[in-house]
């Protein structure tokens, strides 16, 4: 099984970290959807990262679908989702918040770093920045006194939120500071110290 995509994508990175934390063996092929178009297209003509190439040659896209598949095939019944109904609902809620922060951060990055200057839409940039800040403020309010968001050990919520925070901080410096969201920043720092996160570091 092969995971294709660059680790500077929050969606590739959450998929990579999830597989590592669940003990699922896989190969990582670091290809860019911008710089390696012929090679990536040969694997998946949708040119979408992450792409998961299964052992039978079939491909899957979308990090949430890939994460769901990893949950299905995890050895020994391992899971990054709580079994308790209330904790599971909270985890899914926070995963959604994390994905929203990542998505809006990607939009903001493309609008100001990829799109030509004369084609940028200031109102869209302002809207995206407000959505990012509001989402992180919402997550900040949900961070409790325990080390992790949904119990005594890391869950998919911690992975997704921490990955989104790292992407925002790396690609959009100054937009969201640790001092503005101290509990979230501390949570992300704890996550980034985990072996699976260290294996997925990028710069």
Image (cartoon, rainbow, N blue to C red):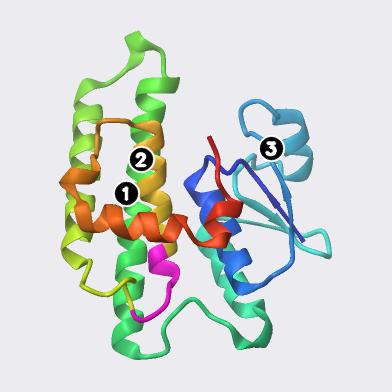
Q: Position of residue 139 (x, y in %)?
A: 23, 59
Q: Residue at (18%, 39%) from the top-left corner?
A: 130
Number of numbered discs overlaid on the protein picture: 3
Using the image, tell me which numbered label, if any, was put on residue 109. none
Give the mark toward the camera: 3 or 2. 2
Q: Nearer the viewer, residue 141 or 201?
A: 201
Q: Nearer the viewer, residue 131 or 26?
A: 26
Callouts 2 and 1 close, C-beta under 8 Å: yes
Q: Is residue 126 left or right of residue 33?
A: left
- Callout in the foreground (2, 1): 2
Residue count near mark 3 (Cα–Cα under 10 Å), binned few <14, some 14–19, many ≥20: some
Residue 195 position, x and y percent, is 57, 61
The residue wearing badge 3 is 31
Q: Is residue 35 above or below residue 57?
A: above
The residue singled out by tag 1 in the image is 101
Res 91 quadrant in image: bottom left
């Amino acid at each position: 099984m092969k995971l294709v995509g660059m680790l500077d994508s929050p969606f590739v990175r959450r998929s990579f970290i999830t597989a590592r934390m669940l003990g699922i063996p896989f190969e990582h092929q670091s290809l860019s959807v911008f710089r390696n178009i012929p090679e990536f297209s040969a694997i998946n003509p949708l040119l979408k990262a992450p792409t998961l190439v299964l052992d039978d040659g079939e491909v899957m896209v979308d990090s949430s679908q890939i994460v769901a598949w990893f949950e299905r095939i995890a050895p020994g019944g391992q899971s990054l989702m709580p079994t308790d109904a209330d904790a599971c609902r909270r985890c899914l809620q926070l995963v959604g918040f994390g994905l929203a922060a990542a998505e809006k951060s990607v939009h903001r990055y493309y609008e100001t770093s990829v799109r030509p200057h004369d084609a940028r839409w200031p109102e869209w940039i302002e809207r995206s920045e407000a959505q990012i800040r509001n989402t992180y403020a919402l997550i900040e309010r949900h961070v409790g006194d325990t080390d992790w968001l949904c119990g005594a050990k890391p869950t998919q919520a911690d992975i997704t939120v921490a990955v989104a925070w790292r992407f925002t901080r790396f690609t959009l410096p100054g937009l969201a500071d640790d001092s503005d969201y101290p509990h979230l920043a501390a949570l992300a720092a704890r996550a980034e110290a985990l072996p699976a996160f260290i294996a997925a570091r990028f710069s």
